Image: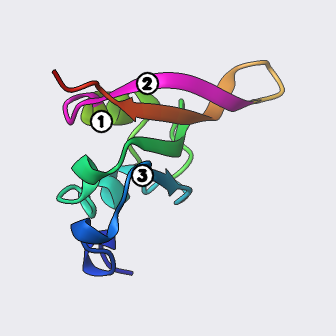
Amino acid sequence: MAPLESFLKAEEISSPAMLKLDVQGFEHEALIGCESILPHFDSVYCECSFIELYSGQKLAFEIIDWLSARDFCLMGVFNSAYDRHGRAIQADFLFRRKARI
């Protein structure tokens, strides 16, 4: 396991480019591992949890805040999963880079 930026150089990313993550509770760590190349992606698609499914994982609101601070805004929530009581557990989130003025 290593940061994405150790395998992919910024100049190898061409628009439109989407970063897709499905890392079982390690979304925050994976995002940190590609923070230097994140500005080269137009969108990010990742599974986020509303409740802690993995010890120490960041929850959906924390991932939303982290990406928002890096100029990505939440555009959609898909494939929501619920427990037997109807409580949301996790979903896929689509983020888009904010338009640059």
Q: What residue sits right under mark 3 in the picture?
A: 27
SS class, disc 1: helix
| CA separation in Å, label 2 and label 1 | 9 Å
Chain part drawn in magenta: 68-80
Quarter occupied by residue 100: top left
User: Are the residues at dot 2 and dot 1 in contact (C-beta closer than 8 Å)?
Assistant: yes
Is 73 colored magenta in this rendering? yes
Q: Amino acid at mark 2?
A: Leu
Number of dots carrying numbers: 3
Residue visible at 27% across and 28% down in the picture: 68
Q: Position of residue 66 (x, y in %)?
A: 26, 35
Checking the image for residue 74, the label placed there is 2
Q: Nearer the viewer, residue 78 or 61?
A: 78
Checking the image for residue 43, the label placed there is none
Residue visible at 19% across and 30% down in the picture: 69
Which mark lies nearer to you, 3 or 1? 1
Q: Position of residue 55 (x, y in %)?
A: 45, 53
- Indicate which disc, 2 or 1, sits on the residue closer to the N terminus: 1
Q: Main secondary structure of the magenta part?
A: strand
Quarter occupied by residue 49: top right
